[in-house]
Amino acid sequence: MTKLFSWSGILPAFGESATTSGLQLGDIIDQLPDPMLVKDKDLRWIYANQAFCDLVGASRDACIGKTDADFFPAHQAEAFCQADRSVMDVRNTVEQEEKITSRAGRSHLMRTKRICFTDRLGSRVLLRIMHDITRREEMETLLVERGARLDSVIATAVDGFVTTDEKGMIESFNPACERIFGYEAKEVLGRNIGMLMPKPESLYHEDHLRRYRETGEAHILGTTRETRARRKDGGIFPIDLSVNAVRFGEELIFSSIVRDITTRKEQEESLRRSLQKILETNTELERFAYVASHDLQEPLRMIGNFSNLLRESLGARLTKDEAKYVQIISDSVTRMRDLVTDFLEYSRHGHETVAPVSSDCNGLLKQTLENLSAVTEETGATITHDVLPVVAVNPIRFVSLMQNLIGNAIKYRRPQVAPVVHVGVRDRDSEWLIRVSDNGIGMREDYLEKIFEPFKRLHDRSSYPGTGMGLAICRKIVTGFGGKIWAESESGQGCSFFFTLPKTSFEGWRQ
């Protein structure tokens, strides 16, 4: 029969003061979170605290008198017994890590301490105290795995990754850095990171890191900046550099991400040169168009004047065909003069000299309608509008824009139908959307983009006179204002022209 265990039997080993507290100590031990087991000289269980009972999944009564073989796999039970006998034979204390598989099949990693005592009757007993370190082991394994994954990511990264200690001595140098700088890692480890920068960049970098160490002022930390670096062969090249500081206890580590931007800078420079060339070419073309259209006015005026003189001087002596030819010359000159005038107007927008000013669009629209009053009265057109905003525009250009759009709405009206035109506006956060809509003849969807091309006409001159430059001028005006213009329409269903105007700090609705 297994003898029941009492803590009072071994308390003298702890000292006389503990002996008088046997009951209280037993209660405390039973409430400890670490499993505790006491074995007799035959290695039978004579005491188990509640934590141990929970581990093996049995009550205390079911545990007393049992052995390790009753609850653990055979190989574990044998290993536990060998360790227990070893401690009891030499009467020492041993601490070791061991795996324990519970009856439920769950594996635990325990830090086990074995202590041999002699009770009051002189019998040896073994105390096993177990601390579950499974979670710690899992976390250590996870950290190792994550560290391995991080090392793999850094090793295969396209960007360079280098770490230094607080004095700037290089501690790690990934393969991308080897490729970027031309050094092998072993050539730079333990050397100052300044070797990878030319002066004054290296001095500038060291000064900022020193300031951070001394004051905590993170002037360049946590940002990406463009600087210069130096390769092993001495070549200087541009990089994007991001530096961060990490503390491990008292240790300060600087980590840097390096990106070689040589190709990007070359592309940017090539693009800059191309844009500059385009701008210069466009400027020359605009200047040529302006001068050419201006200079064409004089010969056209001369042709027109002499054709009129010819008609007046010959008068009735002109045959019917000759009079027709002279009229064709006169009409052609008129059309050519209109075309050159519009082209001159179009080219002028490349040489804008009047700065935008705060302008009340209601007043500018009123001026526009006064300019169109004759055609409005002649066609019986009805023109309405919303309350328009105050915007930053060139007033002359805005009037020209509205006169073109409203004039077109009146011109392209349906036969026997009086034109109805409305100018609407909508607030769209950072811009105003202005709409000019009509009830005219409309147009097919595939024409909606073509109409903004210079000299583009959708109708013959006999039906609708014009040069085809009006909407091209409108687009250039709106683009100069910093907005966009487009049209929406269905054939026979009227047309709507939309354009946007950016808002500015002095804008507001007219009250």
Image: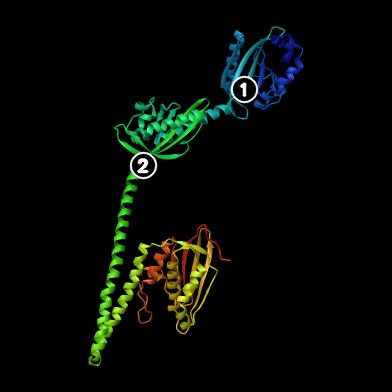
Q: Is any atom of residue 458 visible in this view?
A: yes
In the foreground, 359 or 443: 359
In the foreground, 489 or 305: 305
In the foreground, 223 or 50: 223
Residue at image point 48% right, 77% down: 439
Q: Is any atom of residue 449 visible in this view?
A: no
Residue type for callout 2: Ile
Residue identifier under label 2:
261
Residue 238 position within the rendered picture, expressed as x and y whole percent measured from the top left: 35, 39
Residue 330 against residue 278 in the figure, above or below: below
Quadrant of the snapshot with the C terminus: bottom right
Q: In the image, which disc is placed on residue 292?
A: none
Residue 453 position within the rendered picture, expressed as x and y whole percent measured from the top left: 36, 68
Question: Would you identify the image quadrant in which residue 98 lies?
Answer: top right
Residue 372 against residue 351 in the figure, above or below: below
Residue 421 position within the rendered picture, expressed as x and y whole percent measured from the top left: 50, 75
Q: Earlier in the sequence, mark 1 or mark 2?
A: 1
Residue identifier under label 1:
131
Residue extending farthest bottom: 316
Quadrant of the snapshot with the N terminus: top right
SS of the residue under disc 2: loop
| CA neighbours of label 2 inside 10 A, class few (<14), some (14 to 19), many (20+) | some
Question: Would you identify the image quadrant in which residue 94 lies?
Answer: top right
Residue 265 position within the rendered picture, expressed as x and y whole percent measured from the top left: 34, 44
Residue type for callout 1: His
Q: Check if mark 1's residue and mark 2's residue have beta carbons within 8 Å.
A: no
SS of the residue under disc 1: strand
